[in-house]
Image (tube, rainbow, N blue to C red):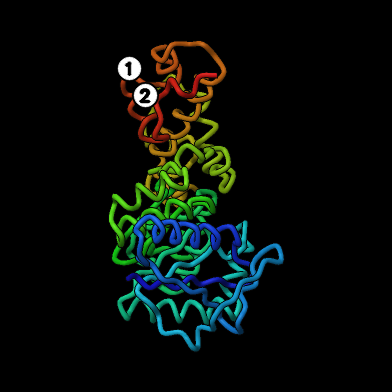
Amino acid sequence: MMRVDVLALEGSSPAALGVTFDVLDAVNRLAGEPVFEWRTLVTDGSVAKLRGGVSAPARPLSKAKPRDLVIVLGIGACDDAAVEERIAAPDALVAARWLHSAWRRGATVAASCTGVFLLGRAGLLDGRRCTTTWWLTSKLKSLFPESLSDTDSMLTDDTRVWTAGASFAHIDLMFGLVARFAGPALAEDAARYTVVDQRASQARYVMPGFLAAQDPIAREVEAYVRRRLAKPFTLQDLAQQTGTTTRTLNRRLALATGLSPMRFAQKIRVDAALHLLQTTRLSLEIVAERVGFEDSSALYRLIRRHTGRSPSLFRA
């Protein structure tokens, strides 16, 4: 039986706690035996005080030896400043030290959304592939520059450290963990039982304009690419347009968007293509031509890779 700790800081997501319990309970029911056993942990006291006035019984970290799997809920912060302030709070520092110790003792540690920042505070993201909610990727990279953050991935697993994207990606995290520790077949059965589709990418939810707003050079790149959607350009062209070197441009775009300049440009083109598919009756061939792809097959593959869906499904 897999023994699970669920770590909830004050203000954590009650939805994520409910998803955690529901998925583990569904697996146990389907298996006909206790595959998972779980408990809720807090930094102090005997009650988890979640966002919205929701509470749940819990045990303090000081009396809890880490179990095989530790799941960290989102920490209740929604923007850069709130995240930075939250992970600097005394209870977050206590939790971070406990998490680092848990991982050193052999536990698998997992988090979704802003809970990933607590893993960073624990020193568990350095040199590891990770993800978080897409609009906070640049903040994750700035706070933990040694992390290998991935804007597009819905779920990552690197050396017993699991991370997932935005808050509802906690569902994907749970089924990924079930597949790893209870087997893919049981994870698939549980997903069907709870009527959940598993997703490989959060790329379809990433808005290039939002990412570009984080940095003036990124905004210049976005404006330039949108003006020249149908025309070819190089990395050197983008650097010249923004008055930077290619090295500086790579660094600034990575910090602002989590992407290389050409990958960011590609995302803008795919975003423009999706807009045309949703708002016009143009053929895929014409859409591809208008957004700068040599042929429709290349655009088709990119849309599938970025969204997990066929272009035809974006038609109005």
Q: Secondary structure at mark 1?
A: loop
Residue 300, position as x, y percentages in the image: 36, 24
Residue 307, position as x, y percentages in the image: 42, 34
Would residue 43 appear left or right of 130 to someone viewing this image? right
* Image: 86 above or below 266: below
The quarter in which the N terminus is drawn is bottom left
Q: Secondary structure at mark 2?
A: helix
Among the 4 quarters of the image, the one containing residue 3: bottom left
The residue that appears at 48% across and 70% down in the rendered structure is 6
* Image: 80 above or below 291: below
In-front residue for pair 36/89: 36
Kindly give the residue lying farthest to the front in the view shown: 32
Among the 4 quarters of the image, the one containing residue 60: bottom right
In 3D space, how far apart are the residues under numbered discs 2 and 1 (Cα atoms)? 7 Å
Q: Which mark is residue 299?
A: 2
Kindly give the residue lying farthest to the bottom in the view shown: 63
Residue 229, position as x, y percentages in the image: 46, 23
Q: Are the residues flagged by discs 2 and 1 in contact, CB closer than 8 Å?
A: yes
In-front residue for pair 157/126: 157
Would residue 175 appear left or right of 138 to someone viewing this image? left
Among the 4 quarters of the image, the one containing residue 235: top left
The quarter in which the C terminus is drawn is top right
The residue that appears at 39% across and 28% down in the rendered structure is 233
In-front residue for pair 172/92: 172
Crowding at mark 1 (Cα within 10 Å: few <14, some 14-19, many 20+): some
Residue behind mark 1: 295
The residue that appears at 52% across and 51% down in the rendered structure is 166
Amino acid of disc 2:
Leu
Kindly give the residue lying farthest to the right in the view shown: 53
Amino acid of disc 1:
Asp
Residue 105, position as x, y percentages in the image: 32, 81
